[in-house]
Amino acid sequence: MDPQIELVVHHQGTAHTFNMSTSATLQDLSSTIESTLNIPTTNQKLLIAPKPGMKKAPFPPTQLSELPISSPKFKITLLGTPAQDIADLHKQSSDTKKREEARISALAAARRNKTTASRSTGGGVHTLSSSSNNYTFHRCLPLSYLPNPARSLQFLERLRDDPGIRAAMAKHKFSVPLLTEMNPAEHTTSESRTLGLNRNKGEVIELRLRTDAYDGYRDYRTIRKTLCHELAHCVFGPHDRDFWDLTSQIEKEVERADWKSGGNRLTQDEFYNPGDWERVQSGEEEFVDECGWTGGEFVLGSLGNGASASGSTPSSGTESRREIIARAAEERMKKEKGNGKQDDRQ
């Protein structure tokens, strides 16, 4: 019988003792570890301190008696994963892959079913019938000579696509060829501020989108309320009882059908002039719209008879913002002087 040596092999925090022959080699130790701990030789790494250091398969035929067993720093650390752990890992990976394939297959089937259902019903879920597509604003047009017309176009399109506005227009069968913005300078006097106009019972609707100083946009809900007022002029011209009843009805229909509201933000853009909505709520906002303007030809920025909607000289469309504001101020001063002369005569 060959003399025996006792070797302690540390693996994952546990010490394992092996009795080996002095003539045994590292290869023999690896085979013993495989049969005892079920760690395949190919998965084994032996860290032998202080020397010869890290060894891995295929192990050299070094005899165990040549190792510095008598050194106080001698230690063998085994790095390796048992075969069962590897098998469990492979099984888990296989199960995960199968679940992912089943999920992908289920999603693909759901998409196919949705497409089939959509084709059979003529489309997805609609809040309005296809025939109601005619009841809308067929064109949105900002004033190109005012600052940032692209943002005004976005505002007009938001009004056009508002679920509440679309539902109300479909219900009352309103079809408006043009929705455009109003130049505040051309529709502001010392006596009034025009917030909207309906030309020829729905031929064109103009809305005051901007602040009077052109430095921002008015509150969206306030402008939408003005739009409800102008839509009512598609049926009634004068501000009589029938007109106000229809306006109230349209406002309620718009609020009720606006399914996008309820605390969720509709856009990241800021369309707000401080005080607009508060003035409407308190009844301080003065609303003037000339009871539905009729007659003549409509040219954006002016009327066919050579006068603008406010009765001023028409804009050429190339004036600067400063010129527009100055012209409007001059017109207000003329009117104020005229009123002063009349008071003196009295």
Image: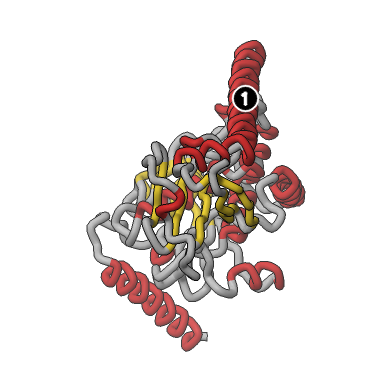
Q: Position of residue 236 (x, y in %)?
A: 66, 43
Extreme-bottom residue of the structure: 344
Q: Residue at x 66, y 47 (%)?
A: 260
Residue beneath label 1, please?
A: 98
Q: Is residue 117 above or below residue 269?
A: above
Q: Nearer the viewer, residue 40 or 186?
A: 40
120 displayed left or right of 213: right
- Residue at 58 percent of width and 55 percent of height: 8
Judged left or right of residue 304, residue 71 is right
In this picture the colour scheme is: secondary structure
Q: Is residue 234 visible?
A: yes
Quarter of the image where the N terminus is located: top right
Q: Quadrant of residue 33?
A: top right
Badge 1 marks a residue whose secondary structure is helix
Residue at the image position 23 percent from the left and 57 percent from the top: 318
Check disc 1: other Cα within 10 Å, few if <14, some if 14-19, many if 20+: few
Q: Position of residue 285 (x, y in %)?
A: 62, 69
Q: Nearer the viewer, residue 291 or 19?
A: 19
Q: Position of residue 274 (x, y in %)?
A: 56, 74
Which residue is rendered at x = 48% and y = 59% of the image? Answer: 269
**What amino acid type should be assigned to the residue bearing mark 1?**
Lys
Tell me where residue 120 appears, x and y as whole percent: 65, 11
